[in-house]
Image (tube, rainbow, N blue to C red):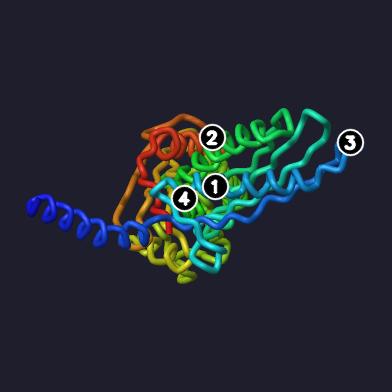
Amino acid sequence: MHCSRLILSAFLLFVLSCSPADAESAIGVAMDDFSYTDTSGEPTNQTAAHERRLAAFMAALRRDIAADSRYRLVPSTRDGAAFKVIGGIQKTSTLVQWAKVAVIDVGAKKLVMDKLYSFRGDNDESWERAEIFLSREILAALATPVPVALAVFDFELEDTTGASAEASATSDASYMAEVSGSVREALGQSGRYRIVDVSGVRGEAGKGRALRDCGGCEAAIAKELGADQSLIGVVRRVSRTEYTLGFQVRDARTGAVLARGDSGLRLGADYSWKRGAVRLVSDRLIEGQQVNDAPRK
């Protein structure tokens, strides 16, 4: 008996010492009560039944989310919520109801889920089935990695041909703008990155020095812009029909190089730079997933 009491005491001490830390590390989720609208036109007034079912639905939904140790329910975004769940249910006919659910990443100010579902029936059983399904969908959305805030600086041109700069300056600027814009678009559309605006940055924080030669200063600039990571890229013109591409990604906080890529020699005139740059970053950063995702904040 004495041994059993010692074991029980040790177990309780372990639980009491670990629970606060676990709760503190759990991700905060705020969930508003869903709205309900009945547009079915049925003659019978079912307001009381719908209010009861909606209340049971929300209680079960909150219970299922809170049951996952990765998350903790908080009253609102002001109470430390990293995510906010909102939604509404509409009854359109006797047998058909629709549920609209959205999950918002509060820090990134971005939707990580925005879906419309239909479920049949308007009784306790059908509402319970809908809640079980939707709780799984919401948990899956919450587990989706937060997009990395990435500052993609304008790609720079390194011309090794010795050609006259004035002769092609205008067209070069146009093609380089296409390269930078297309790379940002591809990375943003991948869902893995949130592109941070760098339109106010020129050269080494406005000093006129190429970022490729500033010894990693782009990481500090990216940090000031609120980014997790920085990306710089270079198009190297070898001849009028040959070029190479390179890029480098750094951690904005530490300056450590997280990924880099080089295309090797490619054939193609300046109008093909955009296609080559998009292919390179897509292969290395999107499909290859070399860069670690940013942690949730």
Residue at mark 3 to residue at mark 2: CA–CA distance: 57 Å
Q: Nearer the viewer, mark 4 or mark 3?
A: 3
- The residue pinned by badge 4 equals 66
In the shown orientation, is residue 229 left or right of residue 38?
A: left
Element type where label 2 sits in the image: helix
Which residue is painted at 39% across and 43% down in the image? 246
Q: Nearer the viewer, mark 3 or mark 2?
A: 3
Residue at mark 3 to residue at mark 1: CA–CA distance: 51 Å
Q: Are discs 4 and 3 less than 8 Å apart at CB?
A: no
Which residue is painted at 71% across and 33% down in the image? 123
Badge 3 density bin: few <14, some 14–19, many ≥20, Cα 10 Å = few
Element type where label 3 sits in the image: loop
- The residue pinned by badge 3 equals 42
Q: Amino acid under label 4?
A: Ala
Q: Are discs 2 and 1 less than 8 Å apart at CB?
A: no
- The residue pinned by badge 1 equals 184
